[in-house]
Structures are given as structure tokens and as C-alpha cells.
């Protein structure tokens, strides 16, 4: 047995060397930086706390909103826009000036409050779109009956 091993020793060294080269080639070529995928685009959901169904002329309604991303990427930026299609009123972020319809505004946080103030005695409806810098967008619809 020892004789067989001694006779094949140079061949075994060659086989081991070949296996080491093949294994190294496989390991180092599979780490090509072009093939690495780093996920930056995380879809998100939006939750809204319950709000009243009626609003009177001059009354302000608080709307609490939370953006819930499915992952965490530090450079995600969110923005908001709205459009009112029934009735009249103003929508604003905290104490900032009221939003203009269809203008895009950056959001500083994923938890925030909007304040809708009715300026009408009829039913009111508006949509809010929240989007991120990767093209994901969610639409929220709000409807208020007039309590006047």
C-alpha cells in the first residue's frame, strides 16, 4: 500500500494543486462587485389615525400619519402633495403655511400631523399623495361631510 502511495505521490500533489486553483478561481470570481445587489428601494405603507367624518366651516381637523417602510435606507426622502376636488379648505403641515394644490413638499419625518381647515359649508374631499425618492407612492383619500 505504501508503495502505491509513494508511486502516485507526484500525481496526488498535482491533483491537490489543481483543486486548490479551481476553488480559488471559483471563490474570487463569484465576488465580482458588478454582481452585488444593494437594496436601496424599499416600498412603504402609510397608516392614518381615525378622523371625524364631519367638519364645520372654520373647523380644523388633525390628521396623524405614519409612513412605515419595509426596510431601512438612510437616504430615503419622502414628499407630499395634495389636491382638493370637492369643497374648499386648507391643508398644512404643523404650523407651516398651507400647502398649494399639486405642489410637492418635502417631509422631515415619517411620523407627522397635517391640519385640514374647512372653508366651506358643503361636503369636502381631497387626496394626499406621499412619495419617496425611488418612485414609490401611496394615495390617501379624505372625505368630510359638512356639519353646518
Image (tube, rainbow, N blue to C red):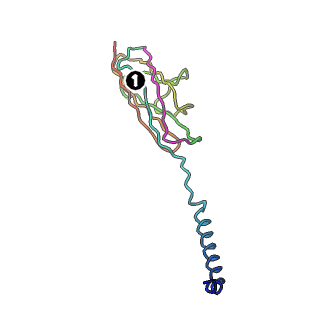
Left or right of 130? Residue 29 is right
Above or below residue 37? Residue 112 is: above
x, y percent for residue 83:
42, 30
* Residue that label 1 marks: 50
How many labels were placed on the picture?
Answer: 1
Q: Element at badge 1?
A: loop
| Residue 64 falls within the magenta-colored stretch | yes
Label 1: how many residues lie within 10 Å, few (<14), some (14-19) or many (20+)?
few
Q: Quadrant of the N terminus?
A: bottom right
- Splitting the image into 4 quarters, where does residue 140 fall? top left
| Residue 80 falls within the magenta-colored stretch | no
Magenta portion: prevailing SS class: strand
Left or right of 116? Residue 21 is right
Residue plotted at (47% across, 33% down): 81
Q: Residue furthest top?
A: 148
x, y percent for residue 102:
46, 33
Residue plotted at (41% across, 18% down): 118
**Segment tinted magenta in the rendering:** 59-72
Q: Nearer the viewer, residue 3 or 41?
A: 3
Above or below residue 37? Residue 67 is: above
Left or right of 124? Residue 101 is right
x, y percent for residue 76:
56, 40
Q: Nearer the viewer, residue 134 or 9?
A: 9
Residue plotted at (48% across, 30% down): 66
Amino acid at each position: 500500500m505504501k508503495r502505491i502511495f509513494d508511486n502516485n505521490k507526484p500525481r496526488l500533489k498535482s491533483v491537490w494543486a489543481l483543486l486548490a486553483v479551481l476553488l480559488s478561481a471559483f471563490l474570487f470570481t463569484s465576488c465580482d462587485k458588478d454582481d452585488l445587489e444593494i437594496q436601496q428601494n424599499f416600498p412603504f405603507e402609510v397608516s392614518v389615525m381615525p378622523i371625524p367624518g364631519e367638519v364645520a366651516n372654520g373647523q380644523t381637523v388633525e390628521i396623524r400619519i405614519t409612513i412605515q417602510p419595509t426596510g431601512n435606507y438612510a437616504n430615503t426622502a419622502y414628499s407630499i402633495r395634495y389636491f382638493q376636488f370637492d369643497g374648499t379648505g386648507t391643508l398644512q403641515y404643523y404650523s407651516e403655511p398651507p400647502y398649494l394644490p399639486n405642489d410637492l413638499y418635502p417631509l422631515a419625518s415619517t411620523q407627522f400631523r397635517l391640519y385640514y381647515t374647512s372653508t366651506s359649508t358643503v361636503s369636502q374631499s381631497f387626496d394626499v399623495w406621499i412619495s419617496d425618492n425611488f418612485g414609490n407612492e401611496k394615495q390617501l383619500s379624505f372625505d368630510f361631510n359638512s356639519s353646518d
